[in-house]
Image: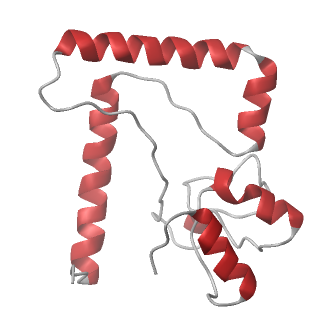
């Protein structure tokens, strides 16, 4: 069942209206640490440094990997020089933020992985994920209704 955010999903999970859910580590880590929700595994390729007691789902199901991506996009026809300027500013901001050991520690504690890179790097990531999930959808016979 789709939810409009973590809060309503956790409300239903904790109340027993649903039996399980998939959620990002940063959005769920406090619920897990407090014992309000019980995590079974992570869906990243490797175990999480912020929740090292949880196995990676791929340990039992080789090749299974799922992760969420939050990104900043622009319209397709945005001039390359504007994209380059925005990308350089974002990467500089990320690098400056990671220079602060308190911010770095907090993000790591929350299980967040921050990736700086080029628009081309991001396009490759999206292309790989599109191929992967297209195969999953087709092999499972998933249809939009």
- In the orientation shown, which residue stands out farthest toward the left? 77
The image shows residue 81 at horizontal and vertical percentages of 22, 9
- Is residue 53 visible in the rendered image? The answer is no
User: Looking at the rendering, which quadrant does residue 110 occupy?
Assistant: top right
Q: Residue 107, relative to residue 13: is it above or below?
A: above
- Is residue 9 visible in the rendered image? The answer is yes
98 left or right, relative to 76: right
67 left or right, relative to 13: left
Question: Residue shown at 71%/35% (left/top)?
Answer: 107
**Numbered circles on residues, count:** 0
The C terminus appears in which quarter of the rendering?
bottom left
User: Looking at the rendering, which quadrant does residue 27 occupy?
Assistant: bottom right
The image shows residue 30 at horizontal and vertical percentages of 79, 57
The image shows residue 109 at horizontal and vertical percentages of 78, 41
User: Looking at the rendering, which quadrant does residue 126 occupy?
Assistant: top left
- In the orientation shown, which residue stands out farthest toward the right? 34
In this figure, which colouring scheme has been used for the structure? secondary structure
Question: Residue shown at 19%/32% (left/top)?
Answer: 75
The image shows residue 14 at horizontal and vertical percentages of 74, 80
Q: Residue 109, relative to residue 7: is it above or below?
A: above
Q: Residue 24, relative to residue 49: is it above or below?
A: below
Question: Residue shown at 24%/56% (left/top)?
Answer: 131
Q: Residue 11, relative to residue 89: is it above or below?
A: below
């Amino acid at each position: 069942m789709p939810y409009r955010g973590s809060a309503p999903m956790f409300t239903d999970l904790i109340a027993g209206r649903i039996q399980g859910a998939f959620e990002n580590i940063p959005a769920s880590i406090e619920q897990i640490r407090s014992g309000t929700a019980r995590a079974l595994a992570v869906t990243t390729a490797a175990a999480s440094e912020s929740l090292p007691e949880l196995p990676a789902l791929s340990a039992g199901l080789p090749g299974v990997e799922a992760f969420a991506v939050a990104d900043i996009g622009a319209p397709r026809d945005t001039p390359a020089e504007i994209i380059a300027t925005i990308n350089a500013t974002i990467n500089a901001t990320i690098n400056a933020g990671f220079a602060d050991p308190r911010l770095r520690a907090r993000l790591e504690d929350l299980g967040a992985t921050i990736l700086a890179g080029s628009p081309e790097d991001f396009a490759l990531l999206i292309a790989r994920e599109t191929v992967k999930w297209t195969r999953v959808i087709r092999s499972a016979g998933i249809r939009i209704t």
